[in-house]
Image (cartoon, rainbow, N blue to C red):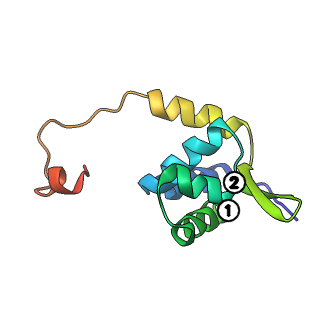
Amino acid sequence: MLTIAPEIEVLARFGRALADPIRCRLLLALREAPAHPSDLADQLGISRTRLSNHLACLRDCGLVVAVPVGRRMRYELADPRLGHALDDLRTAVVAVEADRTCPDAEEKGCC
């Protein structure tokens, strides 16, 4: 049985999901259209095992659902409004300090 998560928990789940670039790419791909895991793995250029781990995380976060289609599973966003939220996040202006304090920022692509 599905339950509705409180607002703070929803934000925390979204944050966990977006903390990994592959999961971000996966969410953006599913924003475009539902897809089967093999197609998603090919589209993202990652192994099916790695994809499976990321899909499990996104399912645990409650952001995607698996829908049986014959013998296969198709993945889609759990709520169409998540696509709108992703669009809003992608286009949001983020204030970043010009003086990075992390010495490895450029190498690691962080901060």
Q: In the picture shown, does residue 43 fall above or below 2? A: above
**Residue at 47% from the left image edge and 33% from the top image edge:** 90
Q: In the picture shown, does residue 1 fall above or below 34? A: below
Q: Amino acid at mark 2?
A: Val
**Residue at 11% from the left image edge and 40% from the top image edge:** 99
Residue 64: which disc? 2
Element assignment for label 1:
helix
- Where, quadrant-wise, is the N terminus in this rendering? bottom right
How far apart are labels 2 and 1 at the CA level?
5 Å
Q: In the picture shown, does residue 104 fall above or below 28? A: below
Measured as percent of width and height from the top left, residue 108 is found at 22, 57
Q: Amino acid at mark 1?
A: Arg
Measured as percent of width and height from the top left, residue 46 is found at 48, 61
For the residues bearing labels 2 and 1, Cβ distance under 8 angstroms: yes
**Residue at 64% from the left image edge and 59% from the top image edge:** 38
Measured as percent of width and height from the top left, residue 91 is found at 45, 27
| Residue 48 relative to residue 5: left or right | left
Element assignment for label 2:
strand
Q: Quadrant of residue 36?
A: bottom right
Q: Residues within 10 Å of mark 2 (few under 14, many from 20)?
A: many
| Residue 92 relative to residue 27: left or right | left
